Image (cartoon, rainbow, N blue to C red):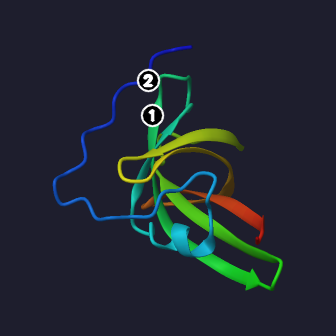
Amino acid sequence: MAARPAPAMPSPGLKSLPPLGETFSHDSLKAHVGETFYVYGGKGLRSVVNLKLVAVEGLRRDKSAEQFAARFSGPVEEPLSAGVYQFQHPASGEFQLLIGPTGTADAEGRYYRADFNLLLP
């Protein structure tokens, strides 16, 4: 496996955020809106693309499940195809996530979406 470049060290003022990974929930992900994630696997395993979580929306919840979508923005010059990527955040750890491009791009960047359909305990 190719070595990954180390992300920049978190700043001393890094806010406290809930861990992600196996414990995804609408609330835990919504706490990360505005945060940047290091995403590995762009144009090769050594490539790192920064994606910013811009929204967590469309919550539908009942007693057995919750559904929602997360939207990310990334650089226009480094498009990602649909697939499973390794995400890393300095305060919340590492996890894999299936994302897909939304087909939209603007001066701010390209946009991606991850859909969640989670069973509740």
Examine the rendered structure and indicate whether residue 54 appears above or below residue 91: below
C-beta proximity under 8 Å, tags 1 and 2: yes
Question: Which residue bears the numbered disc 2?
Answer: 4
Q: Position of residue 97 (x, y in %)?
A: 65, 48
Q: Position of residue 43 (x, y in %)?
A: 56, 27
Q: Amino acid at mark 1?
A: Val
Q: Closer to us: mark 1 or mark 2?
A: 2
State whether residue 55 appears in this view. Answer: yes
Compare residues 34 and 1 and report the one nearer the observer. 1
User: Residue 31, located in which quarter of the rendered image?
Assistant: bottom left
Q: Residue furthest top?
A: 1
User: Residue 81, located in which quarter of the rendered image?
Assistant: top right
Q: Position of residue 102 (x, y in %)?
A: 68, 59
Q: Residue furthest left?
A: 12
Question: Which residue bears the numbered disc 1?
Answer: 48
Is residue 35 left or right of 78 when viewed as pictured? left
Is residue 6 left or right of 62 when viewed as pictured? left
The crowding category of the residue bearing disc 2, from other C-alpha atoms within 10 Å (few below 14, some 14 to 19, many at least 20), is few
Q: If the image is split into quadrants, where does the N terminus sit?
A: top right
